[in-house]
Each structure stands twice: as C-alpha cells, then as structure tokens.
Amino acid sequence: MESICAYVLFVSLFISAGLADALGVKGYDYGRNMSLRLYRRDFGQSSIVGSLPLVDGQPPPRLEIRDLQKDNDQWNLYILALSWMQYTSQDSPFSWYQIAGIHGAPGLTWGNVAPLPGNDNLGYCHHVSILFLTWHRPYLVLYEQTLYNIIQYIASLWPPDDLDRVQKAAKRFRIPYWDWAIVPPAGESVLPLSIGGSSTVNVSGPNGIQSISNPLFSFAFKPFNGSIFPDAPYNRWNETKRAPSPNTDPNAISNNSFVAASLDNHLPSYQQRLYNLFSNYRNYSHFSNEGWISSNNNGTYDSIESLHDSVHTIGGGGWGHLAIIAYSAFDPLFFLHHANVDRIFAMWQVIHNDSYVVPTAAVYASHTQNQGDIEDIQTPLKPFFVNDTSFWTSDMVRKLETFGYTYTEVANKTRAEVIATINRMYTDYSPATILFKDNENSLAHTSPSVDSQAFKTVTQQQSDKSEAIVWQHGSITNLPLDAIFKANINGQSYREWIANIEVKKHAFDSSFLIYLFLGDVPDDSSSWQNLDNLVGSLGIFAGHGQPTKAHNGKVTGTIPLTAALMHMAANQDISSLEPEDVELVLHSALKLRIALVNGTVIDANKVDGLRISIVSSVVTVPKAEDELPNWGEVEANFDLVA
Ligand SMILES: *[C@@H]1O[C@H](CO)[C@@H](O)[C@H](O)[C@H]1NC(C)=O
Ligand SMILES: *[C@@H]1O[C@H](CO)[C@@H](O)[C@H](O)[C@H]1NC(C)=O
Ligand SMILES: *[C@@H]1O[C@H](CO)[C@@H](O)[C@H](O)[C@H]1NC(C)=O
Ligand SMILES: *[C@@H]1O[C@H](CO)[C@@H](O)[C@H](O)[C@H]1NC(C)=O
Ligand SMILES: *[C@@H]1O[C@H](CO)[C@@H](O)[C@H](O)[C@H]1NC(C)=O
Ligand SMILES: *[C@@H]1O[C@H](CO)[C@@H](O)[C@H](O)[C@H]1NC(C)=O
Ligand SMILES: *[C@@H]1O[C@H](CO)[C@@H](O)[C@H](O)[C@H]1NC(C)=O
Ligand SMILES: *[C@@H]1O[C@H](CO)[C@@H](O)[C@H](O)[C@H]1NC(C)=O
Ligand SMILES: *[C@@H]1O[C@H](CO)[C@@H](O)[C@H](O)[C@H]1NC(C)=O
Ligand SMILES: *[C@@H]1O[C@H](CO)[C@@H](O)[C@H](O)[C@H]1NC(C)=O
Ligand SMILES: *[C@@H]1O[C@H](CO)[C@@H](O)[C@H](O)[C@H]1NC(C)=O
C-alpha cells in the first residue's frame, strides 16, 4: 500500500522583498514583502494533476515560444512565473528544484510516492519504455499547472487600470513549446534568443520594468548541494550549463552560441527524421520509444524518443546538464523540448489513432518500477495523482482535452488537415512534396542563417577541409529533378536513404554521439557538431557516473542521408539517388566518428554492440497536400559497421 497525500501549496520564496540574493542571481522586486502573501493557503496547487480551466469553453493552445513572446502580457507573466518557481524554496514540492527533481537527480520521493526497495536513487521517469510519451504528458501538465497558478497570483498584483487585461492574458496561459525541427525565421537560430541570448532579461511586471536573471538561460540552485550530483564537474556547478567551457572547470561558462550553431547544423537531420516518423511509423510501439529493437524490419529503427535523445545531447552542447538523463530536467530547455515532443505525439495520434500502448516489458528500472515489469495501458504513471488515491494511466491521458490544453496543429483539425500541416512544416529537406509545392523547385531553406548579434556562428572553420563534401550551407536553386526521380520519370517515386544504427545505450559511462560526415573530418572533436559536411549525429542519451541499474540492452536510431545526397546530385557529385550511383560514393565518402559528450574520441571498433547499416526505400510521393508519402520495403544496401 502506498501512503499518499495531496499537498496544498505553501509557496515560500527563498528571498523576499530585496530579491537580489547572495547567489548573484536576481529575481523580480514586487515592491512589497512577498513572504507575507506567499503562505496563503488557497494558492491553488496540489499534487493532484487535473484540468486547467477552459477559456470561453475552449482549451487554449500551447504556443511555440516565439509566438508566445509576441503576446507581451503572457510573455511577461511567463518569465515572472518561471523566475518565481526558480526562487521557490527547494523544500516545496512545487519548486523548480522538486518538480525537475521528479525526473532524475536527486532521486527524491515526491508526493510520498515511495520508491521500490533499492530503486531510491532513480528518478520516476520512464525511458526506453512504452510509457515514455504517456508518462511525460501528465508531468508537463503538473509543471504547467504550477506555473499557471503562480501566474494567476502575479496577475492579480497589477494596478487597476491594467488588471483586467493582464488577468485575461493569465487565464489563457499554457506552457510554450520549442520546435527544434522547423526552419526558424530568417536571421534567427533554431535556438531562440530568448532562451540563450542573454543571462538577464528585462521584464515588465506589476512593479515596472526590471532586469532580472533570465530564467530560460539557466536554473541556479538555491541553495546548491553538490552531493545530489555524484560526480565532477556537476557537483561543482551551482547552475545549469549548456556547452560549458572549459568543460570540466568549476568556473565553466555556458556557450549558447555553440549550441545554437550545432542545432542549426542538425536541423536538416532532425526535420527529415521527424517527417519520416510521421510518414512511415504507423505502430505506436515503434514510433514512441527506442526500447523496441527491430529484428525483421529495417524501416523502423527510429523513434520519437531517439530523436528526442539527439536534441538532448546537442541542446546540452555536449557536457551540459540537458545531455545527461538524470540531470536534464533542471535545464529550462527541458520542459520546452518536452512540450514539443508532446505536441508531435498529439499530431501523430491524430493521423495514427488506431495504435497505442500495448503490454511491453520495462527495459529499465525506475523509482517505482522494476526492470522486466510489464507496462501497459493501466500502469499507474507515478507520481501523478488523478485523485487522492489513484494515478493517471496511459489510458486516461490519451486526449489533450482531458487536461484543458491543445496545440494549434491539432485543435479542431481533421486527419487530412494535420497531414497537410506536416507537409507544409516539415518538408524543407525532403523531395516528397517538391512536385506540389508552388513552383519552387528548390529547397527553400538549406540552413538557417544565424547572424544575429548574440549568436555568432563560425562557418569559416571549414577552410582546412579541402576534401570534405560541404553541403549544409549551400543553397540549392535548381533541384535536379530528373536525377532525384530517376527511378520513375513521372516523378512519382524516389529513393530515401538512411543509416540504421544500433548500439548499447550504456556502452560508456556517459552519453555519447555517433556522427556521420561526407569526406574528411578533423581529429579534434570540438568542431564536429558544427562542420559543414556533417550529415547528422545520433545522440545516445545515457547516465553519467551514476549507480543505475543499467541494462545491457541496445537502442536504435537513424541518421537520414537523403538531403545530403540531393545536394550531391545538385552538385553533380552523383547522377541519381539510385543504388548504382549512390552506393560506391557513400562507401568512400561516408565517414563515421564517435565521441563522448565530453569530447573524448572513441574508436568505432571499440563500441560495444555497434552496428550501422545503410538502407534505402522507394518512396511514392503524395499526390496532394493532405496525403503522406508511401514507403516501399526498406532494403539493406550495405553495412558500414557490421
Ligand atoms: C557559483 O559558482 C561560481 C563559479 O564557481 C561562483 O563564482 C559563484 O560564487 C557561485 N555561487 C554561489 C552562490 O556559490
Ligand atoms: C517579510 O515578512 C516576513 C514574515 O512576516 C518577515 O519574517 C520578514 O522579516 C519580512 N521581510 C522584510 C524584508 O520585511
Ligand atoms: C534591458 O534594458 C536596458 C535599458 O533599456 C538595456 O540597456 C539592456 O540591454 C536590456 N537588456 C536586455 C537583456 O535586453
Ligand atoms: C545534500 O544532499 C545530500 C544527498 O541528497 C543529502 O544527504 C544532504 O542532507 C543534503 N545536504 C543539505 C545541507 O541539504
Ligand atoms: C562559443 O562557440 C562559438 C561557436 O562555436 C565559438 O565561435 C566561440 O569561440 C565559443 N566561445 C567561447 C568563449 O568558447
Ligand atoms: C505494434 O507493434 C507491437 C510490437 O511489435 C505489436 O505487439 C502490436 O501488435 C503492433 N500493433 C499493431 C496495431 O500492429
Ligand atoms: C535488415 O538489414 C540487415 C543489415 O543490413 C540485413 O542483414 C537484413 O537482411 C535486413 N532485413 C530485412 C528484413 O530486410
Ligand atoms: C480515428 O480516425 C478516423 C479517421 O479520422 C475516425 O473515423 C475514427 O473515429 C478515429 N478513431 C478513434 C478511436 O478516435
Ligand atoms: C480515483 O480515480 C480512480 C480512477 O479513475 C477511480 O476509480 C476512483 O474511484 C477515484 N477515487 C475517488 C476517491 O474519487
Ligand atoms: C476550436 O473551435 C472552437 C469553436 O469554433 C473555437 O472557439 C476555438 O478557438 C478553436 N480552437 C483553436 C485552438 O483554434
Ligand atoms: C570524459 O569522460 C570519460 C568517461 O566519463 C572519462 O573517462 C574521461 O576522462 C573524460 N575526459 C575528459 C577530458 O574529461
């Protein structure tokens, strides 16, 4: 029997009126003694995850972070509430520290939901599991409700003239997501400036405009207790880092420009992976998680979990918190990233609504689950209470409406409309929709051009790579349609190319990255993420120096090759996408490199369980915008590593 109790929130700020605290970080000065008010009993949050109130009878959409920023009131409320949550005493179950702490470190017990014996160092999260998507859904809602309740209170502090307007904005608030697979607006990076551009932010609150520590830039522990991280350098870093440099130094500083450039360089890979997942993954078991090892189907090596892992490793910039499973939730990027994963899940649910959670053995242990336990549609998603005595289950979290939020891409949309949206948003690097895209006949965006003030990326580092086949930054103006559609001159089918990868998730005592390049690669791994001849990388998101009950199993993922090959065809390096033209070139040009997240280069022959096969499939293109491409059988072409 569990001992379960529901909390009433007693928010307490670690600091009060002065707000410039000893840590050198700064919150908002509300001009009054907040600690008097913050112990109000009716503040609203409980450990029961429920539905947020509808607005005019409708669930408001979660917005992309750049869109939320266009609404001044909602944006200011969001920044203020994030900051508030980060200043809330770490003793509160609704502090940033404890909500993030549900996921992994410090292995805390939340809501009195006790761990299984021996599992008390593990977080509650489910990875490599049929519950990966469904567990994170109520987790996001718990976070969303906590912010929402703080926002309602903050909104009540505005002067009478503004009160009505700000409170209306507060009621519409839902957490934003960060779309890492869409081409960003011209001149911007995949990583928004609001997240990585500055460690401070000017926010307009009820007590005027103030400059505060940017709660999207990092989370500063308050106080920092190094013992929750068993290993260096995390046990010395008192705030979350991204691409910290020098990477093991206690005084390392984040380099968000590096993360921005890496994400931009990976955009073609991420977008192709996402489009392939929407198009060719019809079974929830295959789509959702990387625990399912394909034994007789080479067309389902990828999963949204594996793609999400890659974003974690690149978003952490190598050594940052986001790249380590147990530490990742402390980085403010985590919930933005996961809201996007949840949105992709929702879109997939509309187009493949007949496949869902089926009984599957847990590959990993978690706080409340043992390895080998069968997880199914009724497994309690702990520690997320549906009422005082029960937990949410996958069966209960199927519909967004249950929780009072939605996404623009799925709200009131038919299956055909969702598919049309996918074809519009995620085919910048795919030949699939070229024929019905308005006479563009080109890949509109080859790579975002990141030239804003804060993110200065370095593309000239390529100069010493004479034999590298540069493709990322070259824009194709005239796609060689006859070469791409050589297999079918009516332009109805072409060939997709993919590197299928399988490897042991715990091959190393750390997360690591598997990279593919076209042509020469410098020895120093520090530039790899940003090279112009990078085809893609697969991030293996693992633990770090922690005593997990690590499993010995494999995970799978993919690196798509099609966009890079189209660029080669445009440059007349290959004359078609057919095997006779592609295989020999790939054999000699495709270079494999592996490095741990701290940059240590690993010999591919020494990676436990690594296997990489190059596969391809003839794909019939959609005839209309509301249809998806149709994949043929996925054929094995050759092995890169057997
Ligand atoms: C956080 O760490 C930095 C770098 O070591 C240090 O300068 C700063 O004083 C630390 N802050 C606190 C509150 O310990
Ligand atoms: C704010 O109020 C609390 C609780 O009454 C009190 O302990 C604290 O000293 C006050 N702080 C300031 C700065 O007035
Ligand atoms: C905040 O506003 C000040 C004064 O206008 C400006 O100098 C500063 O650059 C702004 N900071 C940020 C992070 O936008
Ligand atoms: C720091 O964390 C460790 C490990 O979780 C815990 O045992 C210890 O009590 C904490 N120290 C403080 C001062 O909170
Ligand atoms: C941050 O990364 C950028 C892009 O890779 C690089 O040009 C710059 O030198 C780095 N800055 C620091 C301080 O390491
Ligand atoms: C999806 O795949 C799983 C695992 O292979 C299988 O058990 C299940 O029956 C499949 N579902 C459908 C709808 O085909
Ligand atoms: C899948 O690929 C592997 C390795 O490339 C190959 O040996 C196997 O025959 C393929 N399986 C199928 C069903 O095509
Ligand atoms: C799935 O979608 C189809 C087509 O839009 C619809 O007819 C059907 O009712 C849906 N099934 C469920 C279980 O929602
Ligand atoms: C709690 O929820 C469960 C599952 O929906 C339900 O069976 C149970 O009756 C509920 N208990 C109470 C006290 O509402
Ligand atoms: C869905 O449709 C309803 C009724 O027309 C409308 O009020 C609501 O705003 C729509 N939702 C979204 C997110 O567009
Ligand atoms: C990188 O990490 C590995 C494994 O965690 C460790 O053995 C190695 O010493 C680290 N290298 C550096 C340069 O920190």
Image (cartoon, helix red, strand yellow):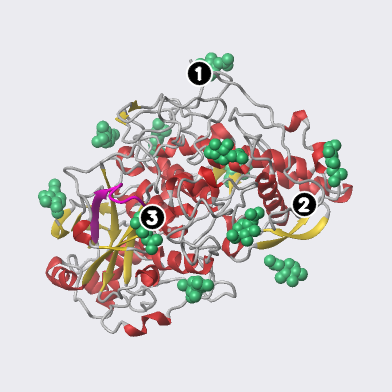
Label 1: state its secondary structure. loop
Q: Which corner quadrant of the figure contains ligand 2?
A: top right
Question: Whole-Å distance between the Cαs marked 3 and 1?
Answer: 36 Å
Q: Amino acid at mark 3?
A: Ser
Q: Relative to the observer, which residue lies in front, 431 or 233?
A: 233
Q: Read off the residue under disc 3.
A: 310
Label 2: state its secondary structure. loop
For marks 3 and 2 on the same chain, the one whose residue lies earlier in the sequence: 2
Q: Per the image, is 502 magenta?
A: yes
Question: Whole-Å distance between the Cαs marked 3 and 2?
Answer: 37 Å
Nearest to viewer (mark 3 / mark 1): 1
* Label 1 crowd bin: few (<14), some (14–19), many (20+), radius 10 Å: few
Q: Read off the residue under disc 2.
A: 19
Label 3: state its secondary structure. helix
Give the quadrant of residue 493: bottom left
Q: Amino acid at mark 1?
A: Glu
584 displayed left or right of 413? left
> Can you tell which mark lies on residue 2?
1
The region drawn magenta spans: 497-512
* Label 2 crowd bin: few (<14), some (14–19), many (20+), radius 10 Å: some
